[in-house]
Image (cartoon, helix red, strand yellow):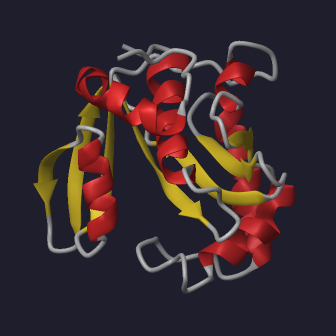
Amino acid sequence: MNDSPETPRTNDPYQAVLTAAPTIEMRLARPSDADYIYSLRIDPAYNQHLSSAPPTVEAQAQFLEGYVKREQAGKEYYFIIKNKLTGVDCGTVRIYDLREDSFCWGSWILDSNKPRYAAIESAIFIYDFGFGALKFGSSHFDVRKDNVRVISFHERFGARRVDENEIDIFFNLSQADLAGKLEELLAITKYKPVYLSA
């Protein structure tokens, strides 16, 4: 159970989790990232399966200002993904809707600057951070039914379908279910998580 998740700090062990992936690293989003995040959310190449973007860059910045307060309260974590090989930002991912023993993740976008294994590395990061640093036992999330590739991706990690509606499929992934798949996943990227183990 997660009673009171701490705000990630710049010192270990949080910094170790943020930089553990071989080809990407994470940093917490700030209002100064509004232009970049907004550009991703309005790009038709990336926004087909996302909720609607804010109407303006200024509205995105206001959202991020509110987000920083939620982060400081331990209620949400919004990450910018950077390509370690080029030093260029290449996407976003967010942890939110923190429940008694489960966290949700989404706002997952990877742009054309991503390295080859950015998808699998960013997903492993989310679970290393959520299960390890924040000490949750499971994760919940939803995927649009027509997003077939992402559905398959999550099921490869061991995610279980728990419900659906006309638009979305709802998933749950426990730390135990992930452990059964982790060795195979880690072998693809040579990722060495800080907390997770097969």
User: Which percent across, then down, holds residue 64?
Assistant: 73, 55
User: Which percent across, then down, holds residue 109?
Assistant: 56, 63
Up the image or down, 163 lies above or below 12; here it is below
Say which of 63 and 86 sits in front.
Answer: 86
User: Which percent across, then down, holds residue 172?
Assistant: 24, 40
Up the image or down, 143 lies above or below 22; here it is below
Horizontally, is 121 left or right of 3 in the view? right
The residue located at (30%, 49%) in the rendering is 154
Say which of 98 and 66 sits in front.
Answer: 98
Quarter in which the N terminus is drawn: top left
Up the image or down, 149 lies above or below 146; here it is above
The residue located at (22%, 53%) in the rendering is 170
Kindly indicate the quadrant of the structure image that contains residue 111.
Answer: bottom right
Quarter in which the C terminus is drawn: top left
- Is residue 173 at least partly visible in the picture? yes
The residue located at (74%, 23%) in the rendering is 15
Say which of 154 and 69 sits in front.
Answer: 154
User: Which percent across, then down, holds residue 146?
Assistant: 26, 76
Kindly indicate the quadrant of the structure image that contains residue 186.
Answer: top left
Up the image or down, 172 lies above or below 144; here it is above
Horizontally, is 42 left or right of 65 in the view? left
The residue located at (14%, 60%) in the rendering is 164
> Farthest bottom residue?
44
- Give the number of marks: 0
Horizontally, is 132 left or right of 144 in the view? right
- Is residue 98 at least partly visible in the picture? no
